[in-house]
Amino acid sequence: MATNVYEGMFILDSNRYARNPESVVGQIPKMIENAGGELLVSRLWEERRLAYPIQGHRKGTYWLTYFRADSQSVAGFERQCQLSETILRVLFLKVDPRLVDAMIAHAQVGPAAGRPSSEGDKPPVPVTVGEDDDDIDDIDENTDDTTED
């Protein structure tokens, strides 16, 4: 049977993760191996407030993994995740083979530089610099572009 690479996004119980992160996260590689898969990358994505409560939890820890497995074992792995008390939600996506190397490399590096954090930081203002800076017009922030006719 052919194996595929999958992206797994887990929402973990933040309270249990805060008390014992190694134990909570350590379950994921064990479940992948028990399902006959091979873990490629596993890392913290972020902790954030959930859009709606899940099992009474208002905050979740997002954990990103990439693993190689056959499609039948993924169904068993998903069932194990549903039975786990520390995993609130899980989503598995099959990764296009042409994108596997790039996505794994990106996951190993971490989040993109300049990405706003969950604390509400504003994203950096993009700056475009052309070959000739004289062509850039000054913009008055107090100007309202709307016109009334």
Image (spheres, grey):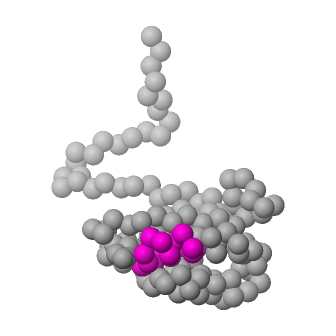
Q: Residue furthest right?
A: 56
Q: Is residue 24 above or below residue 64?
A: below
Q: Which residues are magenta?
A: 61-77
Residue displayed at 31% across by 54% down: 128
Q: Is residue 3 above or below residue 122?
A: below
- Of residues 135 and 94, the one drawn nearer to the viewer in this rendering: 94
Quadrant of the drawing holding the C terminus: top left
Q: Image point 22% across, 54% down: which residue? A: 130
Give the answer, above or below, for where 39 lies relative to 80.
below
Image coords of residue 4 (percent x, y): 38, 73
- Extreme residue in the left direction: 131
Give left or right: position of 8 versus 49. Answer: left
Residue 110 coordinates in the image, percent (x, y): 46, 76
* Residue at left offset 33%, top offset 65%: 96
Residue 63 occupies quadrant: bottom right
Q: Is residue 94 visible?
A: yes
The residue lying toward the viewer, choosing from 47 and 35, is 35
Please identify the residue farthest to the top as the structure is shown: 149
129 falls in the magenta region = no
- Residue displayed at 18% across by 55% down: 131
Q: Position of residue 14 (x, y in %)?
A: 73, 73
Location of residue 114 in the rendering, given as x and y in whole percent from the top left corner = 46, 66
Nearer to me, 115 or 87: 87
Q: Nearer the viewer, residue 35 or 113?
A: 35
Q: Is residue 111 visible?
A: no
Q: Quadrant of the N terminus?
A: bottom left
